[in-house]
Image: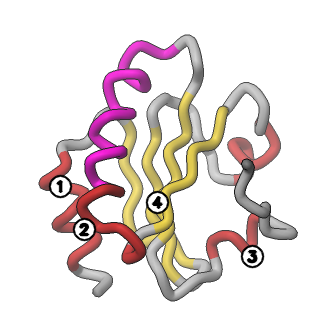
């Protein structure tokens, strides 16, 4: 069953719990390689992290607003603010270090 979707992107990112958004494309090889890394990160952090995957081909408006031009792009939001942003596959150690700064 699908998780209940927030009413807007603003609602989604305006959270005290860090929200990691993975901007990906189904045809992107590095994106496929990144998925297990993000899965492990979510397994390790549990409720201390919200993990959202956004398909760039189906969500072009939000990608334009955030200037997402390469895949994968990782953006971590907390309380509506961008706390971390990087293009390309990120090592789990980098993601954990960035998230630890927000705890």
- Colour pattern: secondary structure
SS under mark 4: strand
The picture quadrant where one finds residue 88 is top left
Q: Is residue 93 above or below residue 73?
A: below
- Mark 3 to mark 1 CA distance (whole Å): 26 Å
> CB of mark 3 within 8 Å of CB of mark 4?
no
Label 4 or label 2, whichever comes before in sequence order: 4
Q: Please tell me the numbered disc located at residue 11.
A: 3
> CB of mark 1 within 8 Å of CB of mark 4?
no
- Mark 2 to mark 3 CA distance (whole Å): 22 Å
Residue at the spot of label 4: 20
Residue at the spot of label 1: 94
- Mark 3 to mark 4 CA distance (whole Å): 14 Å
> CB of mark 2 within 8 Å of CB of mark 3?
no
Residue at the spot of label 2: 98
Q: Is residue 37 left or right of residue 46?
A: left
Depth check, mark 4 against mark 2: the one in front is: 4
Q: Position of residue 14 (x, y in %)?
A: 64, 81
- Mark 1 to mark 2 CA distance (whole Å): 6 Å
Look at the magenta stretch and give its main secondary structure: helix
Give me the residue at 83% from left, 67% from top.
Answer: 8
Give me the residue at 45% from left, 33% from top.
Answer: 72
In the rendered structure, which segment of residues is drawn in magenta? 28-41
Of residues 33 and 86, which is closer to you in this image? 33
Depth check, mark 2 against mark 3: the one in front is: 3
- Callout 4: few (<14), some (14-19), or many (20+) C-alpha neighbours within 10 Å? many
- Mark 1 to mark 4 CA distance (whole Å): 13 Å
Label 3 or label 1, whichever comes before in sequence order: 3
> CB of mark 1 within 8 Å of CB of mark 2?
yes
Label 1 or label 4, whichever comes before in sequence order: 4
Q: Position of residue 79 (x, y in %)?
A: 56, 85
């Amino acid at each position: 069953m699908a998780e209940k979707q927030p009413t807007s992107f603003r609602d989604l990112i305006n959270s005290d719990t860090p929200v990691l958004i993975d901007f990906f494309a189904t045809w992107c090889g590095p994106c496929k390689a990144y998925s297990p890394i993000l899965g492990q990160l979510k397994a390790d952090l549990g409720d201390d992290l919200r993990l959202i995957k956004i398909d760039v081909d189906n969500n072009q408006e939000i990608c334009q607003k955030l200037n997402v031009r390469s895949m994968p792009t990782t953006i971590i939001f907390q309380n509506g603010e961008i706390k971390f942003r990087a293009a390309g596959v990120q090592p789990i150690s980098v993601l954990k270090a960035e998230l630890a700064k927000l705890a």
